[in-house]
DNA sequence: ATCGTTTATCGTCGATTAACGATTAGATAA
DNA sequence: TTATCTAATCGTTAATCGACGATAAACGAT
């Protein structure tokens, strides 16, 4: 795995292509995009509520949630027998910032 | 081949998660993010210029370009023995719009 | 027609992904 | 205790990805 992050001459956001690509990868599946939207709509919810909405097995949804958690976009807190998921608004904002920078002057880069 | 996302009972906005996820997938690799940035910086360029910049074989770069082309983010026009690549600004703008909508009220969805 | 340049495609390999059912683990309820 | 509910994990399968070298295709120049 290569990290491609040279030191940058001070920029508002020292973002790198790896990070942006990583979040894109987490969003590179329709089910996960829908999960993010669903999460934001309900503000927070448990795994079962997502299973009810998607035509996927519980284990598959759990896997998708894991991937989203690993990307940082989603965080989950255990509450008794269930886990409450919600969007990490900061990471989502970070992603949006990087998306807007894509291909622009003060762009993200290696 | 299974499309994991069945047709859903009608919804208003035809802006779909599949499209957004598809573009994200194209950007889900650091090399492709760098290619997009490089393309936008040079406005346009040929494959060889990208090969010079990335630590990848020519065939690999060609593959990445193909993926970017298929996503619509990049278009290439053949010019003699070489192909001139450039960003499709419209598709890039579309992506940015969808990214900003991610998780918002008038969000993209199925 | 042949050469050189540039890019696309083919074939292969190992690694990863997506999906599922089955199982396990945790916490609460009876 | 046992039972129930929820979620995570395991194990498997088929498919896709990322990378490369080798080859082919397209064109301009000689």
Image: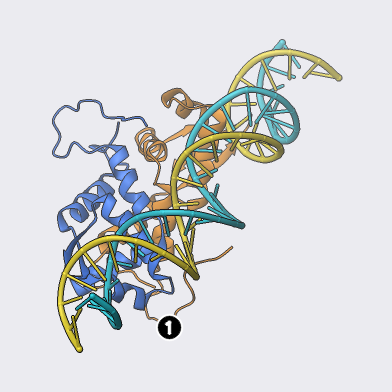
Chain colours: A blue, B orange, C yellow, D cyan
User: Residue at left 37%, top 80%?
Assistant: B12
Asked if A91 appears above or below C7 in the picture, the reply is below
Image quarter of the N terminus of chain B: bottom right
Query: Within the image, what quadrant is residue A73 found in?
Result: bottom left
The answer to whether residue A78 of the structure is visible from this angle is: yes
User: Residue at left 39%, top 81%?
Assistant: B11
Asked if D19 appears above or below A62 in the picture, the reply is above
Expressed as whole percent of the image width and height from the top left, the position of residue B89 reads: 39, 50
Q: Which residue is mark 1?
A: B10
Image quarter of the C terminus of chain B: bottom left
User: Residue at left 50%, top 40%?
Assistant: B65
Query: Within the image, what quadrant is residue A68 found in?
Result: bottom left
**Badge 1: how crowded within 10 Å, few (<14), some, or many (20+)?**
few
Expressed as whole percent of the image width and height from the top left, the position of residue B6 reads: 49, 74
Q: A108 and C22: which one is in front?
A: C22
Asked if A8 appears above or below B99 in the picture, the reply is above
Expressed as whole percent of the image width and height from the top left, the position of residue B90 reads: 39, 54
Expressed as whole percent of the image width and height from the top left, the position of residue A61 reads: 37, 66
User: Residue at left 37%, top 36%?
Assistant: B34
Asked if D7 appears above or below A69 in the picture, the reply is below
Q: A23 and A97: which one is in front?
A: A23
Query: Within the image, what quadrant is residue B42 found in?
Result: top left
């Amino acid at each position: 795995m290569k990290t491609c992050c040279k030191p940058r001459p001070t920029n508002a956001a020292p973002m790198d292509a790896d990070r942006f690509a990583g979040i894109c990868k987490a969003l590179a599946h329709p089910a996960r995009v829908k999960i993010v939207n669903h999460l934001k709509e309900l503000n927070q919810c448990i795994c079962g509520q997502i299973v009810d909405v998607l035509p996927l097995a519980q284990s598959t949804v759990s896997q998708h949630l894991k991937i989203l958690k690993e990307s940082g976009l989603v965080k989950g807190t255990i509450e008794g027998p269930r886990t409450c998921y919600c969007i990490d608004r900061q990471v989502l904002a970070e992603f949006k910032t990087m998306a807007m920078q894509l291909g622009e002057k003060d762009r993200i880069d290696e």
